[in-house]
Amino acid sequence: MPIGLTSDELDRIDEVIGARRKIKRGETVFHNGEKFTNLYAIRTGFFKTCITSEDGRDQVTGFQMAGEIIGLDGIVHDHHTCDAVALEDGELCAMPFSQIEDLSREVNALQHHVHKIMSREIVREHGVMLLLGSMRAEERLAAFLLNLAQRLHARGFSQSELVLRMTREEIGSFLGLKLETISRTFSKFADDGIVDVKQRHVHILNTDALKDIVNPK
């Protein structure tokens, strides 16, 4: 929520936010093609958005965590263009978009905040396109780990200790890499002393080395 709101404005926003909804791992929040009505604020848990390709495979389009919003894909055509699936048990708050729009016309700070969230999503999409279009496998995985660490750190978590909620296969799908390539690249990073990997636990030992891979000097 935007800062600097009056208590009256906060109360009005509070009225828009629906009841908290608990969601189980593997459960779908919304499906591709479903009518768009709500944005969802993630209170706890980790989610992925994905589309099903023509050959029936899931293509991961993003990973979302607590403090982030899912459902923005539905604004353009009034229906969702992807599936959103919980990677672990979590909790969401549903926010009816029509009510957010109405309230945004009266509370300028809220309108500005919604625009910032949408802009951030556009910037993220452009970043993913750059990632998939021009980077080698090592650069893609390094950029992914740095981005994940930064987002978790912004939410008060460790910048170097990561617990991956997604599988290696899902990471590969998102980065446009095969499972074997992801596993091989993780092993190389470990051999080079950049990370320590124990199943889903990743300890970043050398952040600067990851940055150098993404932006060689």
Image (cartoon, helix red, strand yellow):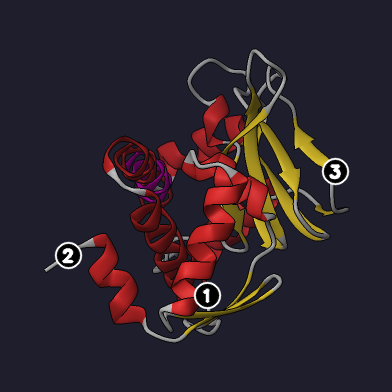
Q: What residue sits 37% from the left and 39% below the top?
A: 132
How far across and down, in percent of the image, does residue 194 sit?
A: 42, 80
Viewer-proximal residue among 217 and 155: 217
How packed is label 2: few (under 14 Cα within 10 Å), some, or many (20 or more)?
A: few
Residue bearing the label numbered 3: 27
Could you tell me how far apart the alpha carbons at marks 1 and 3 are, in whole angstroms?
24 Å
Residue 119, magenta (yes or no): yes
Q: Which residues are magenta?
A: 112-123
Q: Main secondary structure of the magenta part?
A: helix
Could you tell me how far apart the alpha carbons at marks 1 and 2 are, in whole angstroms?
28 Å
Viewer-proximal residue among 72 and 192: 192
Q: What residue sits 40% from the left and 67% below the top?
A: 146
**Residue placed furthest toward the left:** 217
Q: With respect to residue 45, does 50 lie above or below? A: above
The answer to whether 195 appears left or right of 211 in the picture is right
Residue bearing the label numbered 2: 216
How far across and down, in percent of the image, does residue 177 sit?
A: 50, 42
The amino acid pointed to by label 3 is Glu
Q: With respect to residue 146, does 34 lie above or below? A: above
User: Of discs 1 and 3, which sits in the foreground?
Assistant: 3
**Secondary structure beneath label 1:** loop
The answer to whether 31 appears left or right of 187 in the picture is right
How far across and down, in percent of the image, does residue 208 sit?
A: 28, 80
User: Of discs 2 and 3, which sits in the foreground?
Assistant: 2
Q: What residue sits 52% from the left and 72% below the top?
A: 152
Q: Earlier in the sequence, mark 1 or mark 2?
A: 1
How far across and down, in percent of the image, does residue 55 sit?
A: 68, 15
The amino acid pointed to by label 1 is Arg
Residue bearing the label numbered 1: 155
Q: Earlier in the sequence, mark 2 or mark 3?
A: 3
The amino acid pointed to by label 2 is Pro
